[in-house]
Amino acid sequence: MKNNEKRHIKINFIILVLLVIIGRLYDATTTYLYTPDLTNEANVLVKLFDAGWTSIAIIQSTLIILILFLLYFYFFRFKPDLPREKNLNIKQFASFLFFNDTISFNKIFYKTPKNKKTLFAAIGYIVSMTLIAISFVVGTSTTFLIISDNYREIYKQGIPYILYLLIVGLIVYFTIRFFKIEFKKYKQIT
């Protein structure tokens, strides 16, 4: 790998780390400004476990450290075992990455992958990218809750459900993107 390419990877990693941290701080800050006692918080942890700010901070910090570690793994340690076969389609390739064969694509939806390093790299990429996007969307939504009576009324009509659907959609999008990025690397060497 050339020095320019290594530098580009380091810069991308640093930017993503900063975006994760800034996004989480933005979301937390706007949440605190809107609902300091968390009575209006839509976070599942708050609703299900009656978690307070201390619990949320500990859980969020721990998860962010884990996610950033997995993102680091993806950028700097992940070297996938690529198939020797040429001309695989993306489904066959994804199957190979997770299960070391080209015929197990459907298992992705219900079975834990055999290839744990691919699983960890995928989680690092997918969750980091999703977290960046959703942090800024939720932070902005909360900002509108603070400044707009009209938005507060609209929000009550189901915006939290739309945000949850957006999270699922982003996970699907970034999962597909992960496989496309890795597939492109495979195509370049075969």
Image (tube, rainbow, N blue to C red):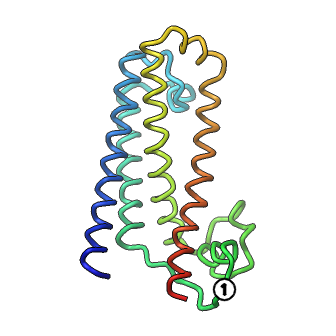
Task: Left or right? Give the position of 143 relative to 130.
Answer: left
The amino acid type of the residue labelled 1 equals Asn
Q: Which residue is located at x 35 percent, y 63 percent?
A: 72
**Vertical placement of residue 20 versus 186, above or below:** above
**Vertical placement of residue 109 versus 88, above or below:** above
**Tag 1 secondary structure:** loop
Decide if residue 184 is in sight here: yes
Q: Which residue is located at x 28 percent, y 73 percent?
A: 6
Decide if residue 55 is in sight here: no
Q: Which residue is located at x 36 percent, y 18 percent?
A: 33
Give the quadrant of residue 110. bottom right
Dividing the image into 4 quarters, which one contains the N terminus?
Answer: bottom left
Name the one closer to the observer, 169 or 35: 169
**Vertical placement of residue 42 versus 176, above or below:** above
Name the one closer to the observer, 80 or 117: 80
Percent position of residue 113, x then y: 62, 69
Give the quadrant of residue 47. top right
Percent position of residue 69, x then y: 36, 59
Task: Left or right? Give the position of 79 relative to 114.
Answer: left
Dot 1 corresponds to which residue? 87
